[in-house]
Image (cartoon, rainbow, N blue to C red):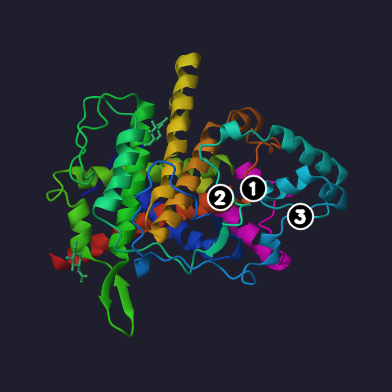
Amino acid sequence: QVSGYLDDCTCDVETIDRFNNYRLFPRLQKLLESDYFRYYKVNLKRPCPFWNDINQCGRRDCAVKPCQSDEVPDGIKSASYKYSEVANNLIEECEQAERLGAVDESLSEETQKAVLQWTKHDDSSDSFCEADDIQSPDAEYVDLLLNPERYTGYKGPDAWKIWNVIYEENCFKPQTIKRPLNPLASSQGKSEGLCVEKRAFYRLISGLHASINVHLSARYLLQETWLEKKWGHNITEFQQRFDGILTEGEGPRRLKNLYFLYLIELRALSKVVPFFERPDFQLFTGNKVQDAENKMLLLEILHEIKSFPLHFDENSFFAGDKKEANKLKEDFRLHFRNISRIMDCVGCFKCRLWGKLQIQGLGTALKILFSEKLIANMPESGPSYEFHLTRQEIVSLFNAFGRISTSVKELENFRNLLQNIH
Ligand SMILES: *[C@@H]1O[C@H](CO)[C@@H](O)[C@H](O)[C@H]1NC(C)=O
Ligand SMILES: *[C@@H]1O[C@H](CO)[C@@H](O)[C@H](O)[C@H]1NC(C)=O
């Protein structure tokens, strides 16, 4: 039932569907299968900072299988030798390696100077996420292709508790709203009366929630025998979450928020193109030929994204009075950081992995959209050396967008399945 124009922007669902499903989705999938994007380093053992009665009941479908150390290409694991020898002698420089995504070892003198500059400009106050300590011995590489996001059986009170905290504690909201135990049940009118930024914050979270539920409905555990498991579309599950009548109008609203999230991440990607266009930027894994091909594919995708005609205009955010706007932006950031910490409280490891990845990806998108450096120093004409993203940020940004893109594609699949029933 979702069609037509979306609120708070000038775009319509049909244009997004066509653009995503036929032009973007197939190429993006190919990119995400590459070594650079499939290995994500994550610490799944960080303790929950908010409460300690986490129910890790060892559901098998929740298990995450980390990579053996020989599975991950050396180029991804060891950051240091991507730099010149001189640079390697400086500890500072080594830390840079992860952050830059990867840089050719044959750096010109000029670039080396720039590298030093970047350190000075690294400013974690830009960050929307609490960074995982990926240097920790507990952090491990995970192969995202071997640990797909799908139905795990993690639902009910444990899962509601997480979503409740996210919605109720962390979303800007009018004070009068009661707390529903089950956020799926009632959230009507929740975002009314809020300014555009706070409404946007709520819509991003709701969109993420919707996207995750689309995935769980599309990769549902349909059948289990001792021989094999069968995963696929469960229309009943989908309808329970999104049908206009069954959800009293909430479902279509949630799906509109999914499209809103799509537009926000799409806009961030279009804005950060010059960073990826820098000649010294590589998707470094150590395999020269493959790395070059991947960069070409990446740029092709980014140029396609840039050509999208109905980009969201983030300038409507945090406009207004400068002091007010800055305060609001800081609030926005703190709330979002808090949500990234809540991910450590998710009981199901598979869900925790994808939750962390998607929150970090969205956080990276917000960092791009609201970075002053990017605005001030990255005109369409040339790359800025003050703005950078770590490999972790790059991997999460594209994988998070890949999830939302997959959700939009899955909506088409569900639409077709539902048509066949009627
Ligand atoms: C689909 O999901 C519903 C719950 O929404 C469940 O009751 C049903 O058993 C599922 N169908 C299959 C084939 O697993
Ligand atoms: C962060 O989350 C915790 C736990 O829900 C809450 O107590 C705290 O007030 C939150 N802080 C912000 C800034 O949202």
**Residue 48 visible in the shown view:** yes
Residue density around tag 1, few if under 14, some if 14–19, many if 20 or more, within 10 Å: many
Q: Amino acid at mark 1?
A: Phe
Q: Quick one: 304 or 361, which is closer to the camera? A: 361
Say which residue appears at 44% left-offset and 37% top-offset. 338
Q: What is the quadrant of residue 170 in the picture?
A: top left
Secondary structure of residue under mark 1: helix
Q: Amino acid at mark 3?
A: Ser
Q: Quick one: 365 or 295, which is closer to the camera? A: 365
Say which residue appears at 34% left-offset and 24% top-offset. 195
Say which residue appears at 82% left-offset and 45% top-offset. 90
Q: Residue furthest front?
A: 52
- Is residue 241 one of those drawn in magenta? no
Q: Earlier in the sequence, mark 2 or mark 3?
A: 3
Q: Earlier in the sequence, mark 3 or mark 1?
A: 3
Label 1 and label 2: CA atoms lie apart by 9 Å
Q: Amino acid at mark 2?
A: Leu
In the rendering, which numbered label is found on residue 276?
Answer: 1
- Nearer the observer: mark 3 or 1; the answer is 3
In the rendering, which numbered label is found on residue 80?
Answer: 3
Residue 41: horizontal and vertical position, in percent?
57, 57
In the image, is the residue at mark 2 within 8 Å of ligand 2 by its beta carbon?
no
In the rendering, which numbered label is found on residue 179?
Answer: none
User: Residues in magenta?
Assistant: 273-302
Q: How many marks?
A: 3
Q: Main secondary structure of the magenta part?
A: helix
